Amino acid sequence: MASYTTGQAPINMQQVSAVPSAYQADALELARAQRLAQMLSSAEPAQGQMVSGRYVAPALTQNLAQLANAIGSAYYSNKAETQQQSLAKKIREGQNAALADYISQSEGKPPVEGGIYGPDNKLTMQTTPDMIGPQGELTSQYKRVEARPAVPANQRAANLNAAQNELLPDWMRQFAIKEVTKGPDYKEITQYNQQTGNTETYRYNANSPDPRSTMQFLGVSKPALSASDRITFGDRGITIPANLGGGSPVVSNVPAGSVPAGGQVNPAQPVVKPATNASSNDLIKTYGYDPFKLPAMPPQPSGEAARDWQKNAYKPLEGTAGQKVDGAKMYYNSLEKYNNYVATLTPADLANPSVRSRLNSLYATAKLTGKEANNLGVLNGGDERILEEVLPNYKDITVTKRNLNRIVQDQKEFASGIIVEAYGTQQKVVPENMRKFVVVPSMQDVKADTSAKNAPIQRAVLNNKAIETRNGKWVYSATGTAVK
């Protein structure tokens, strides 16, 4: 901004034109006073002259005129100085006012509550006698202020006014002009529609003084969650924000056989049937729970997790646990075949080589599967003797059908325990098709048989030769030689 307010030198017309138009009349008056003061101060004093060879002094009136010029020059010089100071003050006040207006329009003004304001600019709610002067006016400590509503910010109006205001600095005017002439700057924004539930995309002009008024709808960026979606997410334990129509995830502790969260019955869950070979009470007494019923479900984070837990409870065992169950089943079946075959034999049948071969084969199979069930090593030496003590061979005359039946029952219970333990450890239900492998101990005590020494002698015929039992072994009656 050009300098037009300082210095004692007379200002010229170029400087006058640089003064804001509101103050040009004052600048012209200042220039006139400066020119008059300069003109009067430059007048030369009256000089005497030679007339017919004689010097004639200036007239007294001429000296008076010179004195008047000096007095006038001093007057206009003082007037010009006063006018110059007044003009500078007006311009400074105008500049400050222009800057305050720019800030006020840019930031807006808060509302003012009307009333009487006292010391420290505090609003007084009631008028007291000490506030009133002798003429009924407010004393100097109080002033009445009219209520004023809030003035919203308007940056564009502030820039428009600043661009045309000569009192503001040049750099501020240039900045205002640049802001006013800016083109639109479109940006995208998404917002949730409370009525439709959709997430919508809009664009707006960031350079606008009221960007919201320039918003234009572009489309739906995320459709609203349907009722089915909300149920599905909630069932999976996924939290849906409340503004999207959701809430807390479904926490489920669905008992077995009921309808889990989501309204769907688990199709993988079979119907539990009554026990066929043992009551539920007997199973509970033996194993501590009914292995054919789903145990109590621990709290699950969602309905989906509850159904997964139920589904997993009915899945077949895998890995080491599955191998244990398979080994126990094979042992159980081989015990049953061995015991059932023995039940069909008579003492005379033992003399038949084919019968003895079949008996030995079934016994060997039972021992091999028993090795797997007992998790033993190579079947020889000590491990084999242990199995023979646990499960004797019926061809030994000391073993009766009754004793063998009880031993086989005990081994079946052992295999049953392996199966129940494997499923229980994995929190799984024993399948219905495996009920035959889960048994409970017999409630009847088994009385000891008569010893082999006191057992009655049994006689038979083998290869047209008489044979009989002696000391628990089959021998030829004629020679006493052991039958091989």
Image (tube, rainbow, N blue to C red):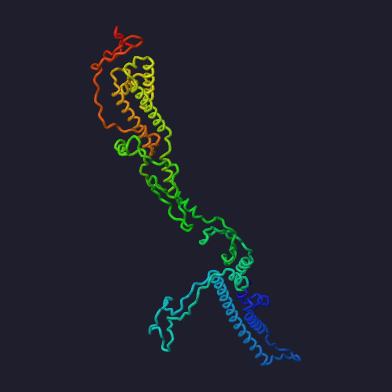
Viewer-proximal residue, 295 or 395?
Answer: 395
Taking 71 as reference, is 321 above or below it?
above
- Residue 101, how many percent across, how many down? 56, 73
| Number of marks drawn | 0
Taking 43 as reference, is 396 above or below it?
above
Quadrant that contains the N terminus: bottom right
- Give the residue drawn at x 68%, y 84%: 43
Residue farthest toward the right in the current orientation of the protein:
52
- Give the residue drawn at x 38%, y 21%: 362
- Residue 164, how many percent across, how many down? 63, 72
- Residue 280, how many percent across, how many down? 32, 39
Residue 153, picture quadrant: bottom right
- Residue 405, how many percent across, how many down? 31, 25
Residue 309, picture quadrant: top left
Viewer-proximal residue, 373 or 359?
Answer: 359
Residue 98, picture quadrant: bottom right
Viewer-proximal residue, 98 or 193?
Answer: 193
Quadrant that contains the C terminus: top left
Q: Is residue 330 left or right of residue 36?
A: left
Taking 52 as reference, is 453 above or below it?
above
Q: Is residue 354 left or right of residue 167?
A: left
- Give the residue drawn at x 37%, y 14%: 353
